[in-house]
Amino acid sequence: MFVRFFLFGFFFFCYFLNLNLNANEKQLIVNRLLEINNLTFQFEQIIKGDIETGNCFLVFDNKLKCKYVEEIQKEIIVNDKTLVVIKKKYNKIYIKTLSKSPLLKILNKNNLIKFIKESKLELKENINLTYTDKEKQGVTIFFSKKNYELLGWKIKDTLQNEIYFLLKIQNINTQINDSIFQIPSPN
């Protein structure tokens, strides 16, 4: 009888200790995010085995500009709920709305903090936070165990392709000119 009681108590203790550790990890990530207004970073984007690289500026809330290092001279601009893909080599501009995009969970600090609090935490090589919404859209965001900084994310696009967007932060809270997020007019 004592052994059963001891085992039950031990597992009960371990369960709540794990819940407390997960809550603590999440709070440390939130605390780190609260210190950040913007990021400059290098990225690697992987879609169906194809790898693209470049540099980005991210300003909370809802502003992102990425320049890809490739021959078609692609740029992506997000400003509020508008996403623009520019392919300078072909003189093409594509404008899309982000109203239901999982990117809005990442680019808006309040949405990101809500995501962190509601997500499932897994401690692996990094801290992986996963959330699936009502539309069954899954998003996983990766944070460093060491300093709780954003490392990237995994989302599914409208064609159900998994997109890995991995980043290496270069600067935090530097001066970024707001004009770089200006949406160009289509041709």
Image: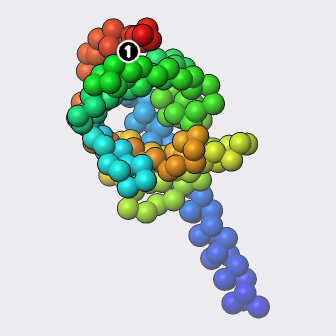
Tell me: 90 left or right of 14: left
Q: Give the image location of residue 131, x and y in percent.
A: 61, 47
Q: Quadrant of the N terminus?
A: bottom right
Of all residues, the one furthest to the front in this rendering is: 90
Q: Please tell me in which quadrant of the rendered image residue 2 appears.
A: bottom right
Which residue is rendered at x = 27% and y = 28% of the image? Answer: 73
Q: Residue at x 29, y 11 (%)?
A: 177
Q: Look at the picture and state if 17 lies above or below 136.
A: below
Residue at the image position 59 percent from the left and 53 percent from the top: 120
| Image quarter in which the C terminus is found | top left
At a point 52% along the width and 33% down the height, the residue shown is 103
Q: Is residue 140 visible?
A: no
Q: Quick check: 15 above or below 165?
A: below
Does dot 1 land on a helix, a strand or a loop? helix
Please state if 65 lies on the left or on the right of 114 as rendered.
left
The image position of residue 77, as x and y in percent, is 40, 22
Residue 60, compared with residue 125, is above or below; it is: above
Q: Nearer the viewer, residue 77 or 62?
A: 77
Q: Amino acid at mark 1?
A: Phe
Query: x, y percentage for residue 117?
Result: 59, 42
Residue 71 visible from this viewpoint: yes
Mark 1 = which residue? 181
For residue 6, what is the image quadrant? bottom right
